[in-house]
């Protein structure tokens, strides 16, 4: 079974600085998708970014980018120019064959 | 992305009673999912609900406890039956449809239902 590991329960970043959230996964599949979701205190799960495993190019969405290392099974999220509104729980997720698995989450605090 | 609503947004229930949570999507989608998120925890998949077929339950979840309906391509319900305090959680529905802008595998989530069982 696929597993997703987020080794950082909590992270903190100064406003306007850059922070990287780590995620590793374990799978024997070659075709899959990876995601980062954000869950603010409102509890709404918001899609941040999506990566297709067959694409070597790292996905980017404005201030959010990923470092996808397929051989190492690593999928980190970089948030540039952090804003107060980025404060939330961040979940890494692995998808294959209609099955989505989530990591334990990383709570990000943004300091003004 | 799809717009998903859930009712109720929150509820406080007595032990032994049942609660039905509704999930409504603004477009037709093939696959809908129900998740449980216990306090301070990650999301755990309860079941997958496809229209026209029985829901598929994950290990540890059974139909008698969490019956699910999927009468059409825009609506689903999850019932939490014979509740106990251990059922206190956030329950989220999500949808996946490769035809949506997010692409295959992307799930969009409802706002969640916060359930407290006394």
Image: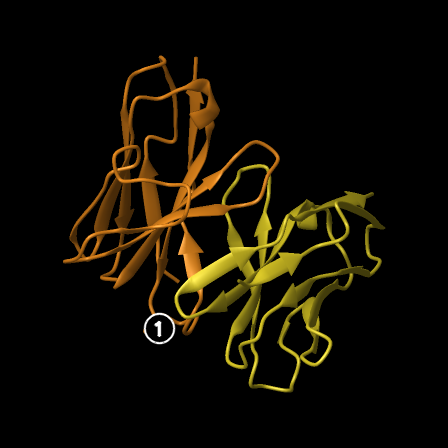
Chain colours: A yellow, B orange
Residue A57 sits in quarter: bottom right
Q: Quadrant of the N terminus of chain B?
A: bottom left
**Residue at point 62%, 59% (across, down):** A4
Q: Nearer the viewer, residue B9 or A53?
A: A53
Could you say where residue B27 lies in the image, as x and y percent from the top left?
25, 60
Q: Mark 1 packing: few (<14 Cα in 10 Å), some, or many (20+)?
A: some
Could you say where residue A67 lies in the image, as x and y percent from the top left?
72, 74
Residue A58 sits in quarter: bottom right
**Residue at point 82%, 61% (across, down):** A18
Classify B104 as above or below A43. below
Could you say where residue B24 lies in the image, as x and y percent from the top left?
26, 47
Circle 1 residue: B98
Q: Nearer the viewer, residue A33 or B110?
A: A33
**Residue at point 18%, 57% (across, down):** B51
**Residue at point 42%, 41% (across, down):** B60
Q: Is residue B52 left or right of residue B90?
A: left
Could you say where residue A109 lies in the image, as x and y percent from the top left?
76, 43
Q: Quadrant of the C terminus of chain B?
A: top left
Q: Is residue A112 left or right of residue B53?
A: right
Q: Nearer the viewer, residue B107 or A73?
A: A73
Q: Secondary structure at mark 1?
A: loop
Q: Is residue B84 left or right of residue A44?
A: left
């Amino acid at each position: 079974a696929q597993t997703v590991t987020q080794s950082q329960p909590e992270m903190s970043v100064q406003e306007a600085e850059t922070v990287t959230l780590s995620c590793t996964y374990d799978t024997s599949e070659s075709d899959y998708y990876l995601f980062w979701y954000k869950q603010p205190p409102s509890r709404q799960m918001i899609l941040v970014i999506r990566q297709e495993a067959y694409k070597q190019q790292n996905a980017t969405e404005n201030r959010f980018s990923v470092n996808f290392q397929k051989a190492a099974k690593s999928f980190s999220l970089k948030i540039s120019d952090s804003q107060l509104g980025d404060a939330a729980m961040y979940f890494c997720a692995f998808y294959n064959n209609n099955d989505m698995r989530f990591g334990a989450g990383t709570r990000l605090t943004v300091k003004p | 992305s799809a717009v998903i609503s859930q009712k109720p947004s929150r509820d406080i229930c007595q032990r032994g009673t049942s609660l039905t949570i509704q999930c409504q999507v603004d477009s037709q989608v093939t696959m809908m999912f129900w998740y449980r998120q216990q306090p301070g925890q990650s999301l755990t998949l309860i079941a997958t609900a496809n229209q026209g077929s029985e829901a598929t339950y994950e290990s540890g979840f059974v139909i008698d406890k969490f019956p699910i309906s999927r009468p059409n391509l825009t609506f689903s319900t999850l019932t939490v039956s014979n509740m106990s305090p251990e059922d206190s959680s956030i329950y989220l529905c999500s949808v996946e449809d490769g035809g949506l802008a997010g692409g295959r595998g992307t799930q969009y989530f409802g706002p969640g239902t916060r359930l407290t069982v006394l």
